[in-house]
Image: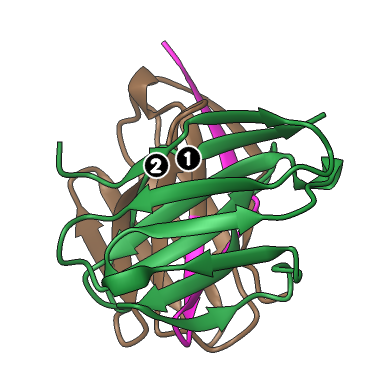
């Protein structure tokens, strides 16, 4: 499979703590994207990092990409209860996008 | 609202029936994607269009599945002779080009009895 794989599958933290989730993939990519999906709702794009970038920030989000290890990480700082959702990485492999099975994040108030 | 819209939002059908879903992408987005998502899993790529041309189809897309995007605007996904294994959420997404973020619609939840 060319899908990304997220780790951990589930993560439970207290509000205010940081959350880190990881993504590994198997093939060369053009870019890697992270999406959030709230229970029963659509996917929302969070951040995109291109294959020639190593780190990117957007608000409380920080994403890193290591193409030599075929891995990426998403850090959410100062988490809020509203961050409770499933998080997916999606790899762009020649215009086909492959999603992992996601990390389910629970932020307890 | 100028986001991606999908119709219907829910569809219940009996095994063996044909169903058709519609996706209206964001205006002027050239790329349109179809995905299938089952419970607890991430979206699985099915197919994508660049304008009206269908450029890629996943092996998941059996000959019972067909997608069209006439005139490069809205798209339809048809499933013929539905099976219980087709029960899933069918997601549509669009993007300006292949190198950009995708904007997802709310999905069509299909239940095959």
Return the x and y of residue B50 as percentages of the image width and height: 34, 80
List the residue tagged with mark 1. Answer: B107
List the residue tagged with mark 2. Answer: B6
If you read the primary sequence from the N terminus, does the residue marked by circle 2 or circle 1 appear first?
Answer: 2
Magenta highlight: main SS: strand
- The local secondary structure at tag 1 comes to loop
* Residue B6 in magenta stretch: no
Return the x and y of residue B41 as percentages of the image width and height: 67, 46
Q: Nearer the viewer, residue B17 or B49?
A: B17
Return the x and y of residue A22 as percentages of the image width and height: 55, 57
Q: Are marks 2 and 1 in contact (CB under 8 Å)?
A: yes
Q: Is residue B10 above or below residue B83?
A: above
Chain B colour is green
Give the letter of the chain under mark 1: B
| Residue pictured at 29% horizontal, 58% vertical | A47
Chain A colour is brown
Give the letter of the chain under mark 2: B
Q: Is residue A102 above or below residue A17?
A: below
Q: Residues within 10 Å of mark 1 (few under 14, many from 20)?
A: many
Q: Which residues are magenta?
A: A89-109
- The local secondary structure at tag 2 comes to strand
């Amino acid at each position: 499979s060319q899908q990304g794989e997220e780790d951990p599958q589930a993560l439970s933290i207290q509000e205010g703590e940081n959350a880190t989730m990881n993504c590994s993939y198997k093939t060369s990519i053009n870019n890697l994207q992270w999406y959030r999906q709230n229970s029963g709702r659509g996917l929302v794009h969070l951040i995109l990092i291109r294959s020639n970038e190593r780190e990117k920030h957007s608000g409380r989000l920080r994403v890193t990409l290591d193409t030599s290890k075929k891995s990426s990480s998403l850090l959410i700082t100062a988490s809020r209860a509203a961050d409770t959702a499933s998080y997916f990485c999606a790899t762009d492999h020649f215009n086909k996008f492959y999603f992992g099975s996601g990390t389910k994040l629970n932020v307890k108030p | 609202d100028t986001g991606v819209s999908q119709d219907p939002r829910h569809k219940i059908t009996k095994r063996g029936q044909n169903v058709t879903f519609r996706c209206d992408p964001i205006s002027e987005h050239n790329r349109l994607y179809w995905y299938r998502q089952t419970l607890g899993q991430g979206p699985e790529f099915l197919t994508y269009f660049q304008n009206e041309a269908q450029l890629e189809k996943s092996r998941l897309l059996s000959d019972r599945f067909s997608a069209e995007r006439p005139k490069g605007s809205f798209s339809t996904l048809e499933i013929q002779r539905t099976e219980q294994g087709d029960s899933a959420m069918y997601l549509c997404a669009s993007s300006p080009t292949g190198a950009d973020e995708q904007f997802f619609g709310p999905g069509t939840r299909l239940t095959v009895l």
